Image (cartoon, grey):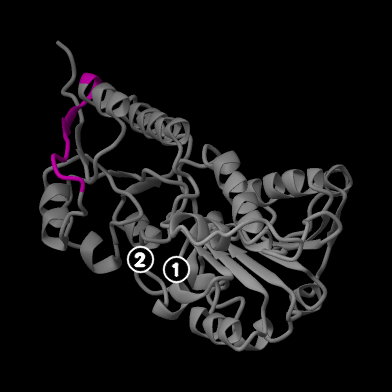
Amino acid sequence: MPSKRLSVVVTRRLPEVVETRLKELFDVRLRDEDVPMTRAQLIEAAQEADVIVPTITDSLDAGLIGQMGDRLKLIANFGAGFDHIDVETARQRGILVSNTPGVVTDDTADMVMALMLGVTRRIQEGLGVMQEGRWDGWAPTAFLGGRLGGRRLGILGMGRIGQAVARRASAFGMQIHYHNRRRLRAETEEALEATYWDSLDQMVARMDVISVNCPSTPSTYHLLNARRLKLLKNTAVVVNTSRGEVIDENALTRMLKAGELAGAGLDVYEHGIKGNPDLRNMPNVVMLPHMGSATQEGRVEMGEKVLINIKTFADGHRPPDQVVPSML
């Protein structure tokens, strides 16, 4: 007699091919509306499921996890970041947590380069002029930006994405520097032609572009705080595709308004989904709605990892992408 299929709840709409496969393998409850569940809906759903598949828009804090009941055994996150999940509380309650690392690496690194170019080549300003019909012809001194080649790039966080950024930036002729929790192996550093800085203060003071590619943890909260941002050259550009909380956004905004930084490219924000309102009116700031991993290929691959994590768990094994305490 076949074993009972796992009950799985998905909190957001996923690519159709992923939802179809979930229906084939599990007793799955999908969303009709593509809006975040309320706190009450999350609790109710988890109490009736063996597995819940949340996304970054679901805040699974200690209080919520504590009300999820005893049936839930796996939180199979759709996404690489897991700072919206209280992993320690889940572990204490015997709930495993998995994520989808690796599949967004290239997509996010591509977006870092897009944001760098968007700011340094003033693409947003040119686009606005064309869309508003204000262009009155080419001029030798119009829309002058700067080339990336020869600039010093400081990468904050040299994991998968940081290294992918380094490889792309090197192809543009940029000089690669980085600060990381742990120094890379010598052969990796050599392959990337990357210079390691033990002191983040010393690195940021000498860079032309800073790319934030570290996860959001208690130790990285406001890692680029007001004091450290003041160390940057006034010709420097800041790009963030990681998590908004790594940068003191209000301090960044003040410096951009005062002309103490050349520009910023942001895909994530510290407060809510819209960022500081003052940023939206600055011609030297490119703002995107968290599009770093938004490719069809990437989202399907994320779904495939979720499927593998749940199927492996259903077969009585630990999910291959289980989040463990050393990752926190």
Q: Residue at x 37, y 43 (%)?
A: 78
Per the image, the residue denoted by label 2 is: 273
The quarter of the picture where the N terminus appears is top left
User: What's the CA distance linking mark 1 and mark 2?
Assistant: 6 Å
Q: Which residues are magenta?
A: 24-34
Is 327 within the magenta?
no
Is 28 within the magenta?
yes
Q: Residue at x 28, y 22 (%)?
A: 21
Indicate whether 228 appears above or below 321: below
Answer yes or no: do the residues labelled 1 and 2 have beta carbons within 8 Å? yes
Q: Residue at x 79, y 47 (%)?
A: 172
Q: Residue 128, image x and y in percent?
A: 49, 60
Along the horizontal axis of the image, is 205 left or right of 58? right
Residue 269: mark: 1
Along the horizontal axis of the image, is 2 left or right of 77? left
Residue 12 appears in the picture as rendered: yes
